[in-house]
Image (cartoon, helix red, strand yellow):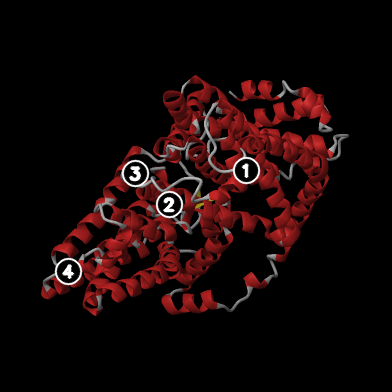
Amino acid sequence: MNKLLLKLLMLPAFLWKALGADVEQLEAILTMRITIDDRKPLTMGRRQNKKRDVKQGSLLSALMFTGMGAIYSFPIWTIDDRVFGLSIYFSLLFLILTLTLITDFSNTLFDNRDKYILFPRPISDRTIVLSKLLHVFIYLLRMVLPMSLAAWVTLGVIDGWKSALLFPLPLMLMVCMALFIVNSFYLLVLQVAKPEKFKDVINYFQIITSVIFFASVYLLPQFFKGDGATNGLNFSRFSWMRYLPSSWLGSCWTWIGFPQHVGNGALNSALGVLTPLVCAFVLVRFLAPRFSKKISGIDGAEGSEGRQGATGKTMVRSGTHIKLANLFNVSDEAKAGFIITWLQSSRSRTFRMRVYPSFAFVPIYFVYLMFQNGGSLSYEFAHLAESSRYFLLLYMSSYVLIISMNYLIMSDQYKAAWVYYSAPLAVPGKVMIGGLKALWVKFFLPFFIVLSVFSLSVWGPHILSDIFLTLVNVTLLSVCMARISYRQLPFSMMEQQKQKSGRVFRSIATMFIPFMLGGGHYLAREVWWLKLVFLVLSSILLWLLWDSYANTSWENISKEEANL
């Protein structure tokens, strides 16, 4: 597939030459990049050992993007005004593409290896930058084509073959504009922020993007339920949209007879075609040299940041995490595990990317569940105090702790775990329990307090006993899962290491625990003495599992590693 797309992209060789690139060098660089990409392991949790794995991973990604595209295509089949509906569709798709480019393709655009391989050779900046853009363009096509499939088929069925034949043109123009916007954004960030902070900025955009994806999948369709939900959506109410590039792309349908009710359809469609071409020219001609210089600056800044880490402020012997480690731990081993986990969870961009969005997932999913009763969101919030949904909200806080525990034992630098084995550590479980306490204090407890304050403000102080019982039950759940599924030292395992069937079965079995705890708590909600008995029993079980996990031996860890 990559080779076919490469041949198609090299057909307009005259255009790349007119933009100032060396065509032969461009094709050689793109061939090299695609060859390297085909040899990389998949990012969905398995290693690429067989060609079948590659095909299955590509098929899974295509199905995922097709499903997402079906959700985003709702304006086409819900809005009668075709130009306006397509303007909204291209706006949504443009937003998703832009955020995806900013987050997922930053490593491709800022590949520091070019500094050592390509920069010393007689290759112009325009050729290098254009090779990067076309490389990203190939992968964007692999994402955009399945994502646009639902809209493409819908237009063909509703409007006929003319609309389906026209659809690919504005789609490709939209991808070109997204590339220009993202590269301009990169240069703006590098102009404002220090080079060593660039990847941190990108990391936070990754977090925002994942939250937007999650919210759009669950909440966006809910706002357009019902036959009359889109009756008020037209250009007369949103005339400002005619100034957006996505509206210019939608105006291309005036070519095949669809009317444009606001603005000049011919002028807007001409802007939709010319703007991406002008953007591509400006990007390659004027922004390419600065782009290459900024890449070199990032590489140097990262090196200086790594050297400063040994003597910087993050290595001081006093701080909040040190005080908390002394407060929540008795043994030195547990304090060490607490401090290691606290610091590493802040420094690791991968950990932040995977854990931080979970704080937003919980309220988003809670709002989604409120929609399921069929009423409006304002009505559901007005009658929220009459329900018992605080049980659901409080127990959903466990999601944050479970997600953070899942990545507690994994790390890109897992080989650094040799320090655990070189130290005179008799009981490794003490380090493990210290790491679990760090996650509980740093991520779960503040989040649970926020949800508790919200619940108290809505339902009143009579749920205070339920809050304490939920706190014990969620902590019990986390220790139980750690005891069963995460019995390894902090950040000592390879990323997404394949698990054997027995371990997977145990992980699935632990998913029934929150249902048992939450279900028992819900049944006892009206009987105070039953909740007291439940609290005592949960506390005793928590103490037993806590002690068992804290006394994990090297033999226990070896058995767990044998199951990987």
Q: How far is mark 3 from mark 4, CA to CA?
A: 30 Å
Which residue in the protein does label 4 denote?
Answer: 534
Which residue in the protein does label 2 denote?
Answer: 215
Q: Quadrant of the N terminus?
A: top right
Q: Position of residue 171 (x, y in %)?
A: 58, 33
Q: In the shown orientation, is residue 56 left or right of residue 188?
A: left
Residue 118 shows in the view:
no
Q: Are marks 3 and 2 in contact (CB under 8 Å)?
A: no
Which residue in the protein does label 1 denote?
Answer: 245
Q: Nearer the viewer, mark 4 or mark 1?
A: 1
Along the line of sight, the residue nearer the viewer: 341 or 255? 255
**Residue at 20% across, 57% down:** 516
Q: How far is mark 4 from mark 1, CA to CA?
A: 60 Å
Q: How far is mark 2 from mark 4, CA to CA?
A: 36 Å
Q: Nearer the viewer, mark 2 or mark 4?
A: 2
The vertical placement of 105 against 550, above or below, is above
Q: How far is mark 3 from mark 1, CA to CA?
A: 51 Å
Q: Nearer the viewer, mark 2 or mark 1?
A: 1
**Residue at 59% across, 45% down:** 242
Along the line of sight, the residue nearer the viewer: 355 or 126? 126
Along the line of sight, the residue nearer the viewer: 407 or 221? 221
Q: Amino acid at mark 2?
A: Ala
Q: Residues within 10 Å of mark 2 (few under 14, many from 20)?
A: some
Sequence-earlier tag: 2 or 1: 2
